[in-house]
């Protein structure tokens, strides 16, 4: 109980000051990792060409400044992605003192598994989803005698969007989980509307993937598996909550 006393004496302005310094720390980490990424940008560019290495297409830059701006954009997003766990810990620790004992367990789980799900989605997209997207674009543009010469800036921008999109989609289970824990929606409601949710999942998969049945089934299947795992963990959490109350 004594460890909670200092928190009560902290004023609203003090809380804002703490938040300000945490945000400064997050931006500092983004800046430092971004600078490091810019130093090794040439190696990152070679690594990011892996999803298109099997395609007969060359990367070029059309404007004098395009390659420099592409390196800067790549460095910024690399810093942003690499600092995600640190940002989650910093911003989460700001609200941690106000959490109850049971809520803190979910906080620990979120800090561990949200980055795991995010980076897992990014890696899955980089290894499997992005190559399908680029292969589809080449197939779509073939047959008319026009040679494929892709701009390095447009390629990196599209790759970043594709990778981050799947990484963000993989955060959906945590959104559902916290909505359930906050009582906004129930597990039983989600289970009753499972058929509708399956249809919505595969519609989303069809929108974010190229018109290829295999990629749509894989992405939709992974999203549905995450949905079912969310229901399982939510049920386990609900049962543990009911036992002390009884």
Image: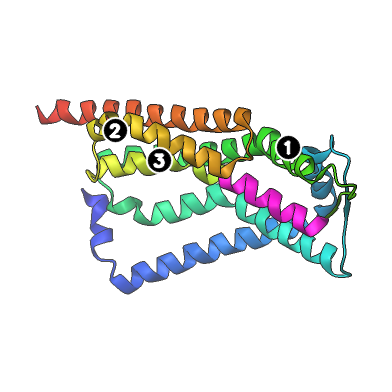
Comparing 124 with 201, the one in front is 201
On the rendered image, what quadrant is the C terminus found in? top left
Mark 1 closeness class: few <14, some 14–19, many ≥20 residues within 10 Å: many
- The residue where tag 1 is placed is 131
Mark linked to residue 174: 3
Residue at the spot 78% in from the left edge and 59% down from the top edge: 153
Find numbered disc 3 in the image and state the secondary structure of the residue it sits on: helix
Tag count in the figure? 3
Which of 77 and 154 lies nearest the eye of the viewer? 154
Mark 1 vs 2, N-terminal side: 1
Range covered by the magenta-colored residues: 151-165
For label 3, the crowd category at 10 Å Cα-Cα, with few meaning under 14, some 14 to 19 and many 20 or more, is some
Say what secondary structure mark 1 lies in.
helix
Which tag, 2 or 3, sits closer to the chain's start? Answer: 3
Where's residue 128, x and y in %? 68, 33
**Viewer-proximal residue among 106 and 119:** 119
**Relative to 88, residue 76 above or below:** below
Please report the residue visible at 28 percent of the width from the left and 59 percent of the height from the top: 7
Q: Disc 2 marks which residue?
A: 193
């Amino acid at each position: 109980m004594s460890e909670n006393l200092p928190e009560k004496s902290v004023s609203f302005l003090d809380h804002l000051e703490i938040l300000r310094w945490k945000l400064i720390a997050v931006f500092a980490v983004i800046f430092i990792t971004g600078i490091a990424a810019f130093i090794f940008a040439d190696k990152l560019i070679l690594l990011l060409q892996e999803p298109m290495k099997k395609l007969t297409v060359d990367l070029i830059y059309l404007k004098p400044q395009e390659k420099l701006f592409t390196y800067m954009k790549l460095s910024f997003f690399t810093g942003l992605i690499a600092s995600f766990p640190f940002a989650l810990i910093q911003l989460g620790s700001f609200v941690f003192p106000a959490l109850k004992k049971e809520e803190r367990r979910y906080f620990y789980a979120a800090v561990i598994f949200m980055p795991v799900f995010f980076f897992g989605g990014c890696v899955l997209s980089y290894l499997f989803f992005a190559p399908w997207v680029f292969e589809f674009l080449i197939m779509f543009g073939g047959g008319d005698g026009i040679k494929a010469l892709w701009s390095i800036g447009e390629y990196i921008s599209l790759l970043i969007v594709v990778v981050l999109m799947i990484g963000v989609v993989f955060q959906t289970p945590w959104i559902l989980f916290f909505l359930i824990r906050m009582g906004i929606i129930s597990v039983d409601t989600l289970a009753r509307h499972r058929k509708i949710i399956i249809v919505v999942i595969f519609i989303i998969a069809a929108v974010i993937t190229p018109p290829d049945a295999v990629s749509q089934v894989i992405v939709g299947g992974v999203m549905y598996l995450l949905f079912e795992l969310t229901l399982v963990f939510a049920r386990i959490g609900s049962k543990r909550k009911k036992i002390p109350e009884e």
